[in-house]
Amino acid sequence: MGSDDSTGEASIHPLMTDRLGRLGVRSGQILLVIALAAVAVFGLVQLKLVVIPLLISVILAAAIAPLVGWLRRRGLSAMLATWLTLLAGVLVFGGIITLIVLAVRTQWGELAQAGSDGLDELQVLLLEGPIPIDQAQLEAARAAVVDFLTSSEFGTGAIAGVSAAAEAVAGVLLVSVILFFFLKDADQIWAFLLRPFQGARLERMRRIGDTAPRVLGSYVRGTAIIALVDAVAIGAGLAILQVPLALPLAVIVFLTAFIPLVGATVAGILAALVALVANGPVVALIVVAIVIVVNQLEGDLLQPVVMGQSLKLHPLVILVALTAGTILGGIAGAVLAVPIAAVAWAILKVWNGPDETVALRAPRRRRQGAQDA
């Protein structure tokens, strides 16, 4: 029996150690890692009501922490510095929301009338244009829209919208609580998470702890500066052209600027549509030109100065991150995807040392070993 077992092991050993066997073992390991990653991602998606507020809190804490640290260096306690920072943020955010509401209430009637006139002009254009569309087809399309708005499907969608709004409110409250503790007790929380590590792993985690908040905070603050410049420039252009809802549109430009590549396009299209409805095609074309010029100045001049090369990601990486984030987390995922990708790249750069990437350090070690031999 012993000889049969040894013969069987001897016959299996070449199958596992030749080129195809090693490839099969490596493929099995890769498939196992992919399966575990898929399970982890699935679990995170199921818990997105907690995961997304947690990630938003981490990003906001990394961006706001320097202000809290500055207040603490002025002699304030951690509790007082955190409360003052959060209250200042609430006042600024509340003031912006108030200005938006007042602007919408003041100009909504004008915009609604302009929109109605624009729809009438569009209807006349469709009836008299080169495409053969008669009045009956337009009436049928309008009836279809009315039927949808009064159908049970629209009611179900409205209920879903109310549920989403409730989830958003709960998420905002959760973000506020988590952000408070991150700003107040960040050092204690990180020290607690480092307890299981020792030696080289502890040093690696400390490097990650130093690098990730710095990179994340720099990315968010840099993006916010660029978004503010874009919003002020485009908002001023809209105000000069007397486009309705210039302030709300400027705020939308600021918010969408946190979604690279896509956000600027969406904001520009929205501003051009409002200008087209309210002011006509000439003003709409001028708005498009303003948006294009501002975006070009941002990409060629402002972004390299504010963000620097250390935070610059290739457009393909940004596109892949945006796609994955949108699939997994919707709009919130699209906003969070790029800063997470930037932090992941920064962590890889310090994985084996303060200033060296994983990809560059391994070949250097191999060359050093060859020289020693």
Image (tube, grey):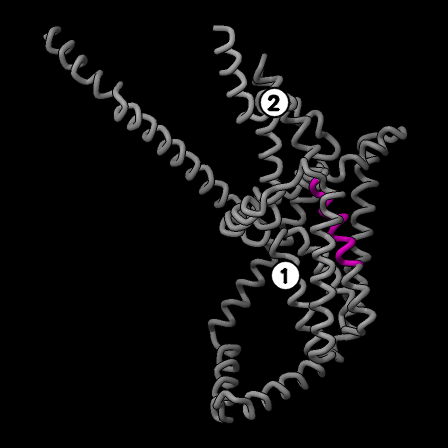
Report the side of 75 relative to 345 (left or right): right
Main secondary structure of the magenta stretch = helix
Along the horizontal axis of the image, is 359 left or right of 17?
A: right
Q: Secondary structure at mark 2?
A: helix
Q: Is residue 221 visible?
A: no
**Tally of numbered discs:** 2
| Residue found farthest to the right | 74
Residue 164 to residue 321: above or below: below
Instruction: Name the amino acid, label 1.
Output: Thr
Q: Which mark is residue 205?
A: 2
Mark sitting earlier along the chain (2/1): 2
Q: Between marks 2 and 1, how big is the CA–CA gap?
A: 39 Å
- Identify the image quadrant of residue 266: bottom right
Q: Which residue is mark 1?
A: 265
| Span shown in magenta | 219-232
Residue type beneath disc 2: Met
Q: Name the residue at 71% across, 83% down.
A: 113
Residue 370, percent across and down? 48, 11
The quadrant of the rendering that contains the N terminus is top left
Q: Residue furthest front?
A: 371
Residue 128's disc is: none
* Residue at image location 69% in from the left, 55% down from the top: 255
Which one is nearer the viewer's eye here, 216 or 297? 297
Q: Position of residue 97 (x, y in %)?
A: 77, 60
| Res 298 seen here | yes
Work out whether 227 lies above or below 22. Answer: below
- Magenta span contains residue 369: no
What x and y, as percent, mark residue 314?
59, 43
In the displayed structure, 273 sits above or below 65; it is below
> Front-most of 187 and 309?
309
Q: Is residue 225 magenta?
A: yes
